[in-house]
Amino acid sequence: MDRIMWNPWHGCIKVSEGCLNCYMYQQDREYGVDPKDIHQNKTRFNLLTKKDRRKMYKVESGSLVMVSLSSDFFLPEADQWREAAWEQMRARRSLYYHIITKRPELIAERLPPDWGDGWNNVMISATCENTVRAVERIPVLADLPLKHRGIICAPMLEEINLSLLADKHISRIERIGCSGENGPDARPVHHEWVMSLRAFCQQHCIDFDFFQTGTNYIKDGKHYVISDIALQKEQAEKAGLNLTFS
């Protein structure tokens, strides 16, 4: 399945602990751009036309579209543009969309009028970088009318204790992903934390995806510094920790 990044707007406002070393903030500051300036983006393709008018970039049916990775799709500051984004998703139902947010409490009022109990080709995931945010955000996400729900523990800042949550909420989560943090000030992730989260997913038959180690990875008491993101992904894949139940 092709994986495509689609950022209909850019810029964000930090909201919790995981935002401390935000990669988007780092990149924008390198270019002398204010990362808190939320504005419409010039995307490299248009989902409605299937092809970008300049580059003729074709979006193949069945592709996975990662939405708003340089912002938060449910930011109030983006309310004026969101309906147009929903319209593109509505028109291209042959694509699969994954929306990740740190603001699940804002979702209910910002769903499209024809949403019903959710769209089959849209997954919405809440970022839960630690136990506090997991306990805060997962029940909100679980109670929303969604066909597909996920959790993203990235950056993973501690061993996350999901057993504090009610079974009725955990049972509605179909996928949990985790990774370490990147950058010169990246906080370390411990292999034991990843294994603990994987064991929880296995116990509850939840798909689990360890998708990258992060810059600072600690395993068996050894500290590994892995700056190259491609190598991080390769090492995470080699660990063989991923689970699929669906």
Image (cartoon, rainbow, N blue to C red):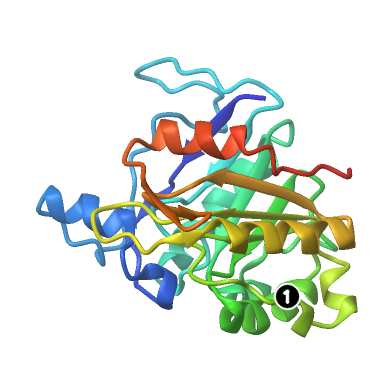
Q: Residue 195 vs residue 73: left or right?
A: right
Looking at the picture, tell me which residue is in the foreground, 230 or 171. Answer: 230
Q: Pointer 1: residues within 10 angstroms few (<14), some, or many (20+)?
A: some
Residue 59 seen from this side: yes
Circle 1 sits on which residue?
162
Of residues 38 and 26, which is closer to you in this image? 26
Q: Is residue 105 above or below residue 119?
A: below
User: How many tags in the picture?
Assistant: 1
Q: Is residue 115 visible?
A: no
Point out the residue furthest to the top here: 56
Badge 1 amino acid: Leu
Residue at x-position 43% and y-position 50%: 214
Quadrant of the rendered image containing residue 202: bottom right
Left or right relative to 117: residue 1? left
Residue at figure coordinates x 88%, y 61% from the top left:
203
Which of the pair 152/46 is nearer the observer?
152
Which residue is at 65% across, 28% downward?
63
Point out residue 24 in the picture as x, y percentages from the top left corner: 31, 54
Residue 99 in picture, x, y percent from top left: 60, 54
x, y percentage for residue 75? 46, 69
Eyeballing the image, is 148 above or below 142? above
Position of residue 95 in the picture relative to residue 172 (left or right):
left
The N terminus: image quadrant: top right
Q: The residue tagged with tag 1: helix, strand or loop?
A: helix
Give the farthest residue toward the front: 221
Residue at screen point 13% across, 50% down: 30
Task: Please name whichever residue, 87 or 238, is drawn nearer the observer in this view of the structure.
Answer: 238
Quarter holding the C terminus is top right
